[in-house]
Amino acid sequence: MGAGSDKISLPNRHTKTFVRESNRQYQTNSGRNSQFNIFNDFSPIIFMEKPAGKIIMGNVCFIIDRKNNKVLLLKRNRAPMQSMYTGVGGKTLSNESPFDSCVREAKEETGLDISEVKLKGAVKTILDGGDSSWILSVYTAGGFCGEMIECGEGKLEWVDINSINSRKLIGFIEKIMPYILDESVIFDGVIIHDIKGNVIKDSIKTYSAQN
């Protein structure tokens, strides 16, 4: 391209342009269709980025009966992880905090009013080959009151903590369960899983929960 006022129009927000002049390299990003003046025989290279998938905010809570050493689990009745166990929870609404969402979901799915709610960690779960991911706030609740109801999402079961591994936990829940039950740590990270919830790769890190 010769010198002058030649212009390059970027097609959309997923395009990056690299412009080279001798041994120097410049990078430009565009949020909308934009134009750049190219001088002195710049040689632009344009390529397309893969758009980011949808990110869903949600929560999962594990209600713990410390007196009887049990935790409340939900055996899912829906595909793709049907008949596998997890905690109670769901999507965080646009006007909710993660904490408020956790309390609401626990009430809707169990009928129980929870208390002594603690944030144990945050994890991003990514379905391998999919176009969306979840960012989950993970909680425990050490107090509860009320009458438990039937859950439309599956069967609720109080499970002895010492035998929790006898249940078929969703793979990424099984991965973080030791940290959920360990009061001395908090955690965060990313988990990539298959359609059945089996962990393919993870980068979970733990941190001391002590002040």
Image (cartoon, rainbow, N blue to C red):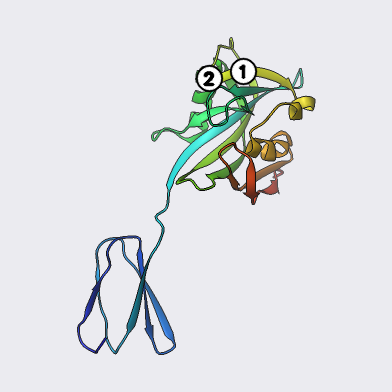
Near-viewer residue (58 or 155) = 155
Mark number for residue 109? 2
Near-viewer residue (65 or 175) = 175
Q: Residue at x 38, y 83 (%)?
A: 20
Mark 2 or mark 1, which has the lower sequence index? 2
Of badges 2 and 1, nearer the viewer stands 1
Local crowd size for mark 2, using a 10 Å CA cut-off: few (<14), some (14–19), many (≥20): many
Q: Secondary structure at mark 2?
A: helix
How many marks are shown on the rendered structure?
2
Q: Is residue 50 above or below residue 132?
A: below
Q: Given contact means CB atoms under 8 Å apart, are the residues at marks 2 and 1 in contact?
A: yes
Mark number for residue 181? none
Left or right of residue 26: residue 183: right
Q: Residue at x 76, y 27 (%)?
A: 166
The residue that disc 1 covers is: 156
The quarter of the rendered structure image containing the N terminus is: bottom left
Q: Is residue 20 above or below residue 69?
A: below
Q: CA distance from mark 2 to mark 1?
A: 9 Å
Q: Residue at x 51, y 17 (%)?
A: 152
Q: Give the percent coordinates (x, y) of residue 5.
A: 20, 83
Residue type, mark 1 in image: Leu
Q: Residue at x 24, y 89 (%)?
A: 2
The quarter of the rendered structure image containing the C terminus is: top right
Left or right of residue 26: residue 184: right
